[in-house]
Amino acid sequence: MMSSEEKESKEGLIEFYSSYRELFEFFCNNTTIHGAIRLVCSRNNRMKTAFWLVLFLVTFGLLYWQFALLFGQYFSYPVSITVNVNSDKMFFPAVTVCTLNPYRYQVILEDLEQLDRDTQETLYTLYGYNVTGVQGRVPTSRRKREARAPLRHPFEKIPIGESVHRRARSVATNDSEAVEVKRRDFNFGFKLCNETGGDCFYKTYSSGVDAIREWYRFQYINILARVPIQENIEEAQLANFIFACRFNEEHCLNEGNFKHFHHAIYGNCYTFNHNRSESETWNSSMPGIKNGLTLVLRTDQYDYIPLLSTVAGARVLVHGHKEPAFLDDGGFNIQPGVETSIGMRKESVSRLGGDYSDCTEDGSDIPVKNLFNSEYTQQVCVRSCFQAIMVERCGCAYAFYPLPEGAEFCDYEKHKSWGHCFYKLNKALGAHQLGCFAKCRKPCHLVDYQLNAGYSRWPTKVSENWVLQTLSKSNTTKRDGVAKLNLYFEEMNYKNIKESATINMVMLLSLMGSQWSLWFGSSVLSVVEMLELVFDIIAIGTIILLHRYYTRKNMSLEEPGGVPPTDPSYGQREQQNSQILRNVPSQSQMRVVADITPPPAYETLDLRSLGGNSSRNSSIRSYASHHGEAGWRGE
């Protein structure tokens, strides 16, 4: 059997301390946190107790200040950049080459000839340049002035500081004064207005050459809108543009290795190694020119449109296998009669998504429809976004971008103010006011190629004759009609730039543990002790509040005027007690009876008789008294 003392000393399943003082004394005596025991050991010395208490609180505050800094740094999501240099077999990038010779569709040939004649007159007025046809396909017999409707948005010379509400002079008018190229009295451009004509501005340039090229380009884009979507292009033979193709010393001039498309400015374009399966993609395992791509291109200039392209040669762009060719952004021109060698270095970038950056994995979470049917890039998204806004605000689509479903390309015969709308939107896009750059986030994974170029005369004077004759199998090809291009990897090492979290969860816990050990010299179990202390404080506080609440409630029930709740059995006991009290006289009545009892008869001195009567009367009083008390007690 367990003694009562052992029962009292045995702890229950859940017990709380009787006071906060007892709780803190137990914690300070038993905790593993350094310095806490000093609060108890030095309690007889109030000065030391106060010193250790202040020191403990200051240290505790500094610890959680450091914790706040750590959490602030963690939730700012910083990243670290890791650069790895890998060496492995690499896939060769896609290479696009263009002829710089836009195709003249038969459907719009008459419109283009009229545009060339107007341009010829403009050039003669500006510079006194008398050309027999701006380009070779306009017959000389058709250069005479004919009765026809003038082009919309004519080219004008605009006095510097001229207001849009004043009349600018057209360069086609017969002014007595000649316009000189070096004069600074005039700017050159053309006027654009909205539907009502209330909002107008001049698209002006200080250089007449730049101004007339932009004006010709604007008119050319407008004419392209009249070409049916399904119009067939009389595609020239691949061999008419690319004389020779070799990759890794292997012949590669066949249509299966190139994909053709037509660009309105850069002409017929051919892309090598584009959008092929991984097993069919050309790759390099060695650096150097012999292990790369070599192309010999035809660069004849007799059929060029000079106002669209003022350079000779070919346009080249190096890009990803599944990316569209944006020749205006990253392309470069190669010169005729020159061998151009391009050394490449590959770089891959991997960004962290989610909270660490606003990049996108594949563009599926971007609220812009991809119109290019290609892999997601930021430029693909921006152009798709601009085209969508163009259709929404201008009512038509820009001719150089894919046509959205249900839309049509801009033509001022149908959309009179599209030029005004287009240039306004283009300016707003450059100023980041359309929201396209906010919607179109950078891709998380990106491959880029750093290019280094070298040039040399090709072919040399000594070998010029036989090289040109071998390439064209005739004597018609000149040195300025051919160009050679070499593309290769300079080395097989490539950089892999990768982002990683500067502070992840593991590092955060490690830093917090280091700070805890620095300020308190304890471990995770000490943190549990602190949590237990907090729980005990809350529990004791809750118990005290509940006790006070019920105490006040009971006191309010005992105040005067308060009606306590009735007990059902109380009425029955009350009736029983009242019946007993009716049958048994009260104590006061018994006293009266005892007082008025007549004295005994002294006629006889018989003690037994006297004693008997006395005993009898005493027994009656005792019996009555007994039953009276029993009735009051409820027995």
Image (tube, rainbow, N blue to C red):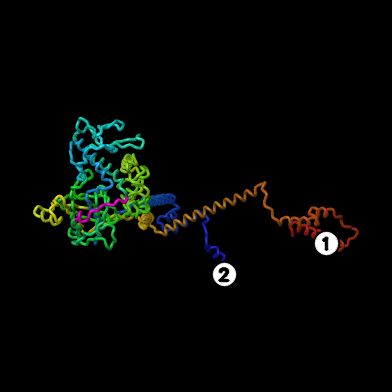
Vertically, is 416 above or below 511? above
Disc 1 crowd, CA 10 A, few/some/many (<14, 14-19, 20+): few
Cα–Cα span, label 1 and label 2: 56 Å
> Is 240 within the magenta?
yes
Q: Is residue 590 left or right of residue 434?
A: right
Counting residues from the start of the chain, the first of labels 1 and 2 encountered is 2
Residue 567 in the image: x percent, y percent?
A: 69, 55
Residue 39 in the image: x percent, y percent?
A: 43, 53
Q: Amino acid at mark 2?
A: Met
In the rendered image, which quarter contains the C terminus? bottom right
Q: Is residue 200 left or right of residue 467?
A: right
In the image shown, does 317 or 517 lie closer to the viewer?
A: 317
First to last magenta residue range: 229-242
SS for dot 1: helix
In the image shown, does 152 or 266 lie closer to the viewer?
A: 152
Give the quarter of the image for residue 473. bottom left
Q: Nearer the viewer, mark 1 or mark 2?
A: 2
Give the quarter of the image for residue 291. bottom left
Disc 2 crowd, CA 10 A, few/some/many (<14, 14-19, 20+): few
Write the residue at 52% across / 59% down.
15
Circle 1/circle 2 CB separation < 8 Å: no
Which residue position holds label 2?
A: 1
In the image shown, does 561 or 440 lie closer to the viewer?
A: 440
- Which residue, as the protein is rendered here, is positioned at the far bottom? 1
Which residue position holds label 1?
A: 615
Residue 36 in the image: x percent, y percent?
A: 42, 55
Residue 160 in the image: x percent, y percent?
A: 25, 32
Q: Amino acid at mark 1?
A: Ser
Visible residue check, residue 119: yes
> Is 598 within the magenta?
no
